[in-house]
Amino acid sequence: MVRRRRAWAAGVVGISTLLSLGAGTAGGRGPDTVGQWTQPFEEGGAGAPRCQPTQDESAFVVCKPAAVEAAVLNDGRVMYFNGLESQENAKGPSPVSLAPSSRDSQARVLDLRTGTAQWVIPNQARGGTHTNPNIKPGHRSSDDPSGSAGVPGRPGDGFVGSAWGSLGGPPHDPTSSPDDPAPNDGDLFCADLTTLPNGKILLAGGSDWYNDPSLMDRNAGDPADVGVAEVEGLRSASLFDPASNTFQAAAPMKYGRWYPHLVAGPDGNPTVFGGVTRLVRNSQLGNVRRTETYHADTNTWEENYVGPASETELPLVPRMVLTPDGRFFYTAVGQMWNPLGESVDEALTALFQFFDPKTKTWSLSGLAPLGARSGAFVVPLTLEPPYDKMTIVTWGGTLGPPPGSWLPANPFTTLTTIDANGNVTNRNAGDLKHARWYSSGVLLPDGQILAVGGADKDDVVDPGAALPVNTPELYNPATTEWTEVAPHSRDRGYHNSALLLPDMRVLLGGNAPLAAHFGGSNQDQGGPFTNNDNDPSFEIWSPPYLFRGARPTIVRAQRGVNHSETFTITTPDAGLIESVLLIRTPSPEHVADSDQRALKLEFTRSGTHTLTATAPPSGKVAPPGSYYLVVNKKSLQGPIPSVARMVDVGRTDLSDAPQPFPDDAPAPSAGSATPDEDTSHAAAVQQHARDITQRIPVVAGTLNRRWLFVAR
Ligand SMILES: [Cu+2]
């Protein structure tokens, strides 16, 4: 059945690939209108099997990691890491076997600077010392039933803990992380990541996997896994140093956070919002209610608490944006599903909310036009001088808090404008051509926005049931309409990622779905459904602006510019430059990248080869950190961007700004990717054969297959 579907799907992929690549057109429109995708490529290429058995005692298969989360480093490379690592090895239905089969996610650094992709394995391939500090040595899940049940918790851990604390009740450790033997206590999966002003990447939160209760655990040498899955939010934080390709431990947060969100503040220090301490048996009736700010200079977290007004309910991965008045704006978008942990005050998630870092308090700002949205994408339009207002574009997702979020994806686009006084106004824009849940979004240097990837429904409700949306769309802020562009080859559903490279192309990767129908190991569903295997491949899109003629070049710019600083850009194209931009380096997580922003700068032509530009006035509109400096050349078809120079905003540095990518080079490529077929299923079969030869009982595995059979 799988094989038959694959033949059919291969035919479809073949045709769309031909349209987008072979003939250079899609729907009769050329790359100057719809752009152009490279072929998929991956670590090791098609010659290296996607999954291979290991020789260690786990006897697991190890697969190439997918780019579930990623960040562009200040040297132009891309650090990324996997999610749902090792699910290929699950032996039974997900509720029993997902946690014990999970492993800490593998990380990679992708280097596209030479035009040929190269991969570096960080010094700690699985994220290093990110292990959950909540683990109690020697402790088993059954030792502390009330801790295991998560009640009553500490104030701030969730609704219950805060309510109990306000009544004067003594706090109880909300979690009871068992000292389970599996190497999955520090999984970066579901951490958020952002770039610090010093160029290091901060990662906060993540996953500790265990069964609770755990009656049998194959990791402990038992013949099968018997228990019920739990995933706990890590308190851990880490720093990734691009200079040494090394992860190092940072101070842990006070609160364990799974699916939190980090946003850089006006001083460049990130604040962490939301997340949940325990996902599955979340007896807190809600998510973490307090925020914490990381101070990079002292490696400390500051708990932002002055009283009850410092707490609120936010969904998982709450989409927050720093607005020009210096406050953090909650856009009424997140991942609105907490299995068994729907919050009692989840109505709040449909309201716009502001968090003021000065007063450390929340204020409500009215109902969002469509209420709460789950798995929508949020990005502000390019900011323009005098930077006194911001318009945020929100599209797609599903509507309503749980269980409304389990409805099909919607095509709706809303524009929300926040002015310098914090006034919020809304209007509608044109609908997406394809309703999409979990699409990524990339703000481009011409001011347009790419919506890419996703699926027609929220398939976390029933993994494997979604249909992929493989035709991306461009949003034009001048017309407020979307138009289709060239389709990509691979399904990019749950856990895709997309980001703007320093050469102004778009890197698309990821796809790391849950096992079909929670059946255990990945099992592709056949038919038209989204690929249900992790996909380690990437595709690169050259936007239409790269087909409009020669690109302008930046011959020199300074490495660091302070706020309001006037600085010189040397370019032979000075007479043709129509705009100068700073674009913050991207760091997407779970189709959210709150730090994504672009700013047009004031500039004058100060000579035939020089421009004089003025940096944005404050960290409220341009938080200190790493940015792309780009100039756009005028053309009849529209702007043509240069390749970026890497510039630090917030400090003066007169040395040369590096340019990681060459001028006007062809799209980087690296050949090939393993075919889009059910390779993890093949790996599972391989594993099954190994188990039989090793006489390991496969009770749970048999159960899994029976269960799947019934489900089908
Ligand atoms: Cu996820």
Image: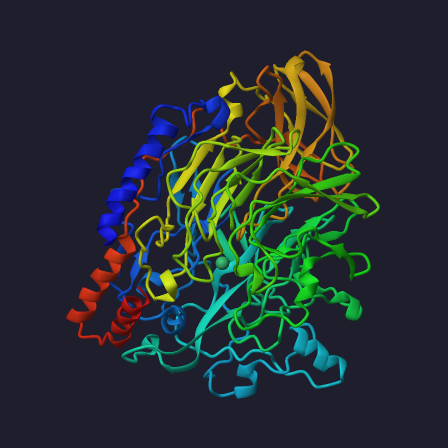
Q: Nearer the viewer, residue 579 or 407?
A: 407
Residue 593 in picture, x, y percent from top left: 59, 48
Q: How many marks?
A: 0
Residue 138 in picture, x, y percent from top left: 46, 83
Residue at 39% x, 32% y is 38
Say which quadrant the N terminus sits in.
bottom left
Residue at 40% x, 72% y is 95
Residue 29 in picture, x, y percent from top left: 45, 23
Say which quadrant the C terminus sits in.
bottom left
Residue 263 in picture, x, y percent from top left: 65, 52
Q: Nearer the viewer, residue 60 or 567?
A: 60
| 267 is higher (above) or lower (below) than 183 | above
Residue 663, visible in the rendered structure: no
Direction left: furthest residue = 693
Residue at 61% x, 80% y is 173
Does 491 sit left or right of 602 as displayed? left
Does 508 sit left or right of 338 as displayed? left
Does 628 sit left or right of 142 as displayed? right
Please identify the quarter of the rendering in which residue 578 is found.
Answer: top right
